[in-house]
Image (cartoon, rainbow, N blue to C red):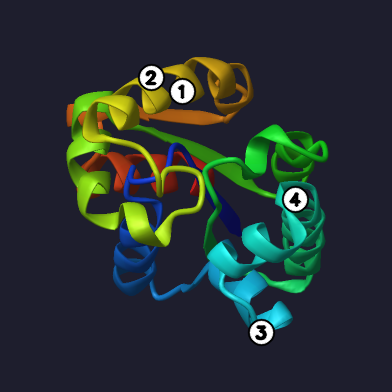
Amino acid sequence: MRLFLLGMMGSGKSYWAQRIAEKEGMDWMDLDQEIEKETSLSIKEIFAVYGEEYFREKERDALHNLSNYKNIIIATGGGAPCFQNNMKWMNDHGITIFIDEDVDILAERLKKEKAHRPLIKNLSDEELYNFLSDKLKERFPNYSQAQYHLKGNKISDVSFAEILKKIHE
């Protein structure tokens, strides 16, 4: 079984990947961390030196390299499903779960992390909220192709357990 968690930055993909993996005895990985290992650069450095297009190519390559892994949960980057036909690839190679957190919650979480996130590093708090709202609208058509959709207050250990139970049936 290969699970792909997708959603906006700050939605908790890495948190839930780690948490579910521990409960289910699975491995987990963060796609951005894999790219950083492979390139020996931070995501911030990749964007600054090589640009977003290069990053998206590395992201696709890292994603495709995961096809050898079994029994794993992958936390994707927020934009991963929206480029390089990645959403179709993930649906063809595993189970996709869209973690759909409210923009107010995303903005509150990300205010403290702006310096480490290239797409939002120079935004004021108000600009951050507007950016997240616009980005979610832009990405939603891709996210909505996920096989499962967990919205706001439905994101819990129980909801993930229910999805895993359905997958095993």
Label 2 and label 3: CA atoms lie apart by: 32 Å
Q: Residues within 10 Å of mark 2 (few under 14, many from 20)?
A: some
Q: Residues within 10 Å of mark 4 (few under 14, many from 20)?
A: some
Looking at the image, residue 53 sits to the left or right of residue 31; the answer is: right
Circle 3 sits in a helix, a strand or a loop, which is it? loop
Circle 1 sits in a helix, a strand or a loop, which is it? helix
Label 4 and label 3: CA atoms lie apart by: 16 Å
Residue annotated with mark 4: 56
Residue annotated with mark 1: 136
Mark 3 and mark 1 in contact? Answer it, CB < 8 Å: no
Q: Point out the tag, 3 or 1, that comes first from the N-terminus.
A: 3
Q: Tell me the quarter of the image containing the N terminus.
A: bottom right
Q: Residue at x 79, y 68 (%)?
A: 65
Q: Residues within 10 Å of mark 3 (few under 14, many from 20)?
A: few
Is residue 140 in sight in this rendering?
yes
Residue annotated with mark 3: 40
